[in-house]
Amino acid sequence: MNFRKGQGREDPEINLIPIIDVLLVILIFLMVTTTYSRFSELQITLPTADSEKAQDKPNQIDIGIDAQGRY
């Protein structure tokens, strides 16, 4: 029973705006949850620096000689 004689059927359109909104919310949710889980799994033990006390200057004599041969 086609009551609309002479008119063709309209093709259904898929509205993409709600699909995009839902996908953006899912994307934001996944980004936030992955960031938190990644930081909670990292167990980092940083090395400590153990060094000896800096030694004094060694016994050293600096001598300067000019062009006339003076020390």
Image (cartoon, rainbow, N blue to C red):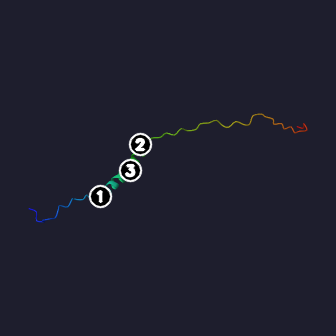
Where in the figure is residue 68, as x and y percent of width and height?
91, 38
Q: Residues within 10 Å of mark 3 (few under 14, many from 20)?
A: few
Viewer-side label of 3, 1: 1
Viewer-side label of 2, 1: 1
Q: As displayed, is residue 51 above or below residue 27?
A: above
| Identity, as a three-letter code, of the amino acid under mark 1 | Leu
Badge 2 element:
helix
| Identity, as a three-letter code, of the amino acid under mark 2 | Glu
For the point 39% across and 46% down, the residue is 37
Which is nearer the N-term, disc 3 or disc 2? Answer: 3
| Identity, as a three-letter code, of the amino acid under mark 3 | Met
Quarter-of-image position of residue 55: top right
Q: Which residue, given by chain and number where applicable, does mark 3 sit on?
A: 31
User: What number is the disc on residue 41?
Assistant: 2
User: What number is the disc on residue 16?
Assistant: 1
Q: As displayed, is residue 45 above or below residue 36?
A: above
Q: Residues within 10 Å of mark 2 (few under 14, many from 20)?
A: few
Where in the figure is residue 30, as x and y percent of width and height?
36, 50
Question: Does residue 23 appear to the left or right of 3 in the view shown?
Answer: right
Badge 1 element:
helix
